[in-house]
Amino acid sequence: GPSWTDRKERSNNIRCPPYTRFSSFCPAVGAYKLLADPHQSYEQPTAKKEDCTMAPKRFLSALFLLSSLPAVIEGGFFKKKHRRQKAGLKHAEHDPIHVVVNKVGPFNNPTETYRYYSLPFCHTHADEEEHKAALEEDMPMGAEGADDSLMTATQRRIKADRVGAERHKQRLGESIAGDRRETSPYELSFEDDIEWRLLCKVTLGTKELKKFKEAIHNNYFFEMFIEDLPMWGYIGDFEDEDAILGEMEGSHTFLFPHLHFKVGTNNAQIVSVTVTTERDRRVDITNVHKPTTVQFSYSVEWFEDHELPWKMRMTRYADSRFLPGSFEIHWLSIINSFVLVLLLTAFLTIILMRVLKNDFSRYMELDDEALEEEESGWKLIHGDVFRFPEFPVLFCASVGTGVQLIVATFFLLGLALTNLISTTRRGSILAGLVILYCLTCSIGSFVSTRLYFQMNGKAWVRCVLFTAGLFPVPVAVVFLWVNTVALAHGSTSALPFSTIFTITALYALIAFPLTVVGGIAAKNYASHDFNAPTRTTKVAREIPTEVPWYRSRFFQMIISGFLPFSAIYIELHYIFASMWGHQIYTLFGILLFAFILLIIVTSFISVALLYFQLAREDHRWWWSTFINAGMTGLFIYAYSFFYYFHRSGMSGMLQSSFYFGYMSIVSFAFFLMLGSAGFHFSLLFVKHIYSRVKCD
């Protein structure tokens, strides 16, 4: 097929319908993503108009039911699904090997995926007579001179008993990731080479040719699996098109109907697979109004791959994306961030320690009469600094949810580092995150309810309910939107009913009960004493209104978000390339290190800005500290716009909805996590400094 460079240059000028357009080809993908396959052109279903007077609950229910329709529409929910072929089996010679097809879609829009058989591929295999007739009557290019020996070499007996487009059973993470695995009619057998074999011979009409041609012009890729090892390829290529005007007289569109499978084995186990297309066998489908007869075919090559053990078979996918080109830069960026964090932390620590030491010395040396005259700055507001914030239920729920997300993140990264969660298995990180969130709900509820009781709160049930819904409700709202958009586009990204039911059951049967248990435990067993070192006055002190611009709330928010963001800026590129691209992120040790650095920097910045706020006699530090610490989440969301428009080729309604919708959830999660971390460090700081000075 065409080179990656050619595809990259062409993809910047692709003409696409509004809902599937994308621009430049992502060159970061390594040699393993090399090939292609298509996706079909599809017709958008006409959306029914909703009644504007529908009640909110009825509207959400309708969206939920609408989101569950893909499984019913595809006809796979009530059909018996095929059991997945177990990977790692030791095969005997001539054992049947199954090729599982998954999905197709534009390469630059990784979320915009569709069923493999949304394109007119072969559903059944040609029988032995059809194969012999194809060899004799319409010999494919490059197969001249075939004789009886070739017939023997290219086929063991063709059974033609495999049928395509039948659904496979999937794991939770695979369904969340948008996989829709189905059977294919390809007949492979262990260690049996095939020089050429006819899959099917069909005459494509105008409708089928238009689907293939649109897929080719939109750089659709296909994905297949052999024993959970993925393969990728392109369906065709186009030539001599104008960079601006697109298809012109003299340009050509070619379909690649032949696939060559190359399978590596070690100790009777399959350890590597690739699929390639051949330009010599391409078919010109430029004129879609002329029926074209196409022979879909395939060949198979088996080889011994002794250097790759079965347990390490996924490493080549990771290596092809990070090593060696970007790995050195990756480490240098982390070292640079680490040095920046050390300097920043040391600088803030030295300044705060010197300033506080001077403050303590001055306050300790004054007698009672002089203290009344000289009292100023943060010492002056000792009677108001522990005045509890407005909206205590929302504040406590936010703090508790942030702690829960921090704990879940550390557990997830720890499990990924110890390989208890497979980082290369499709969707395993997403599935692990869902389960860990449910299992840690009691932690968030315990923290929020305990803090609420320490604030002398009475409506603790309301606090528990707020904690239970603070993060899941925004996630559900975004999901309803993006799932509806995916359904309208006919994409496999729309979760099937079974997956929606599973996630809902996890929340209803595990997450919510654990949230209630955590609240009850905090009510009955946690300490309800806030242990403030100073007494709070009955009347709040007036807050000075005239402050310099560099001490204003807005400026503090910008500083508190920008400095921690600068420590993780470079690492974000790799994370985004993994989340919204085809790269596999495997450096979870570095990710854990970066996450710890982010929490440390955010906490120190929050404490420093809190000191300046108290020094100007502003005692409303609860919400301001939480918001200042969480501002990095807003910077992450702002960076997502930069990445979308300047570092990726993503475009279209479907991809944009998924990208900006779920990035808002990720940014909100960082806002809660960092806000909670900054608040807890700030609370320790405030209690410490006010316990060291003598106050009335």
Image (cartoon, grey):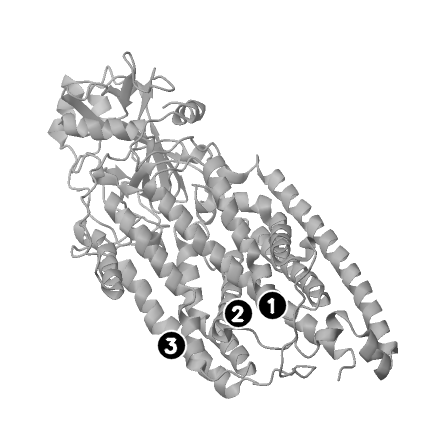
> Gap in Å between the C-alphas at discs 3 and 2?
20 Å
Secondary structure found at label 3: helix
Q: Image point 73% across, 70% down: which residue?
A: 378
The numbered dot on residue 513 is 3
Give the left or right position of residue 438, taking residue 617 as reference.
left
Give the left or right position of residue 283, taking residue 237 as reference.
left
The numbered dot on residue 679 is 1
Residue 85 in the image: state x and y as whole percent. Answer: 29, 50
Q: How crowded is mark 2: few (under 14 residues within 10 Å), some or many (20 or more)?
A: many
Q: N-terminal of the two: label 3 or label 1? A: 3
Which amino acid type is shown beneath numbered disc 2? Val
Residue tagged by mark 2? 399
Secondary structure found at label 2: helix
- Of 292 and 41, which appears nearest the observer? 41
Residue 376 in the image: state x and y as whole percent. Answer: 77, 71
Task: Tell me if label 2 and label 1 are in contact, CB under 8 Å.
Answer: yes
Give the left or right position of residue 430, taking residue 380 as reference.
left
Give the left or right position of residue 172, taking residue 151 as reference.
right
Secondary structure found at label 1: helix
Q: Image point 60% across, 85% down: which residue?
A: 529
Q: N-terminal of the two: label 2 or label 1? A: 2
